[in-house]
Structure formats: C-alpha cells, structure tokens
Amino acid sequence: MSDEASENGPEGEAHDDHPGVDHPGEEHGASLGKRLNWLRAGVLGANDGVVSTAGLVVGVAGATGNRGTLLTAGIAGLLAGSMSMAAGEYVSVSTQRDTERAALALERRELREQPEEELEELTELLQERGLDRSVALEAARQFTERDALRAHASVELGIDPDALTNPWHAAFASFLAFTVGALLPLAAIVLPPPAWRLPVTVVSVLVTLALTGWTSARMGAAPARAAIVRNAAGGALAMALTYATGSLLGAAGV
Ligand SMILES: [Zn+2]
C-alpha cells in the first residue's frame, strides 16, 4: 500500500534519536514482508468480492430476468459485503493493536522497575539466537543503552513500535479490495443482453478466480494448479448452489 510510508514515518526520521541501531537492510526486509501481506490480503479480499457477489447475482438471475432487480441486489450485496469486510478488519486490527500496545506498556514498566532482570532476559534471548554468552551480554548492554524498549519489542515480542498497523487503513483496504472484486460479476450480470448474462458471468468469474488462485499460490510459492482448481471450484459451487435455489424459488413463484 502506498500509505505504508506514512505509517513508518519517512525513512530515517523515526530513528533519529538513535542512529546507531538503524539497519537499512533489515528495514527493507520487514517492509517487503509487510507489503506482501497487504498484497495477499488484497487478493483474498477481491476474491471474496467476486465469489459472494457472483453467487448473489446468479441466484437472483435464477429467479428473475429483471435487470433493475439484478442491479439492486448486486449493489446491495457489494455494499453489504465490503462494509462487513471493512468492519471485521477494523475490529481485528484494533484488537491486535491494543494487544501490542498493552505488551509494549508492560515491557516499558518492567524495564523501569526491574532493569537487571530485563537485561538478563534480553541476553538469554540473544543467546538462544546463537550468540555466545559474552557477546550476547555486550549486545544486550548496547541495545539497552540505545533504545531498550525497541530492543525488547523486537527480540522478545516481534513488534516494531513505530509500525503498528492502522485499523482505518486496514478497513479501507478491505473495503476497496472487496468492491473491486464485486464489480466484476455485477457488470457481467447487468451489461450483456439477457441471453448472455449467465454464460458471460460464469465464464468471467471462473477465469478471474483462476487468476486470483494463481496469484495467491505464486505469492506463497505454492503449487499453482491445485490453487487454481480449488479456487475456481469454490466459485462454481457457490454459483451452482445459489442458481439452483433461485430457480426453485422463482419457479415456485416466491
Ligand atoms: Zn523484556
């Protein structure tokens, strides 16, 4: 995401008080991982938008050929789904950030009240990572001198205190990803002439799901074919189920 820079602060600025602990290589490694996480979440969110909206509009199309009804159902489904994703993401990221903040506060208090134990703890953690006792102790001393909280946050908790995820950013990203995905089946069901609606929707949805399945497999370095088949099969199943249900309800005159 492009707003990532604003979360981390302009490069270098966040570490001005202790330039000695700034390792540009590590920062880039961490932000690459973060960017991949955002990308993965975006692809999954778009995938959700495609499957859920495709199931919805194909189900309604099983019951009625009325374009206005299809459009209304599709837009309502798009908004409901993207809001639900955004709210869920907001809650989950807020909770995670609260947890991380509480852990940092506890760490800050421990550093203030029992600095000796905390130095020993950091030393042992560094030893577990493969340093000799004497080197670990010296490293722990230097870390503690420069920025004890940052060292404990990183080594003990795996947190960068300057880069906690913003729940609003996460919520907006989810909203956007779902909406982009949902627009495809929505357009495919309302734009073509009536006889073409279903075939165009089914084919474009399956092709898109194959693409998102392939993309997420590539990002996780997993076998692509299995991911494509699973992803497209999930969408096909959703559309078959809602179409059958919609057709039954339409035939029953509901
Ligand atoms: Zn600690």
Image (cartoon, rainbow, N blue to C red):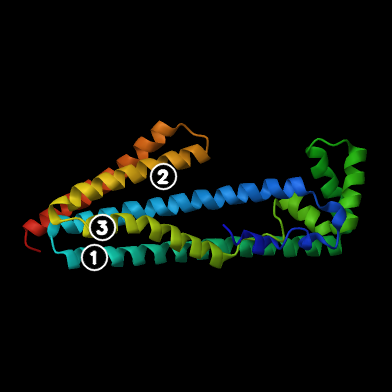
Quadrant that contains the N terminus: bottom right
- Quadrant of the rendered structure where residue 230 is? top left
The residue type indicated by label 3 comes to: Leu
Closer to us: 53 or 199: 199
The residue pinned by badge 1 equals 71
Q: Label 2: which residue? A: 212
Q: Residue at x 44, y 63 (%)?
A: 175
Relative horizontal placement of residue 81, taking residue 15 as reference (left or right): left
Mark earlier in primary sequence (1, 2) = 1
Separation of residues labelled 3 and 1 (CA atoms):
11 Å
Residue type at mark 2? Thr
- On residue 56, the disc is 3
Query: For the point 30% across and 43% down, which residue is it?
Result: 206
Are the two marked residues, 3 and 1, in contact with CB atoms closer than 8 angstroms?
Answer: no
Residue at mark 1 to residue at mark 2: CA–CA distance = 25 Å
* SS category of the residue bearing label 1: helix
Q: Secondary structure at mark 2?
A: helix
Q: Quadrant of the C terminus?
A: bottom left
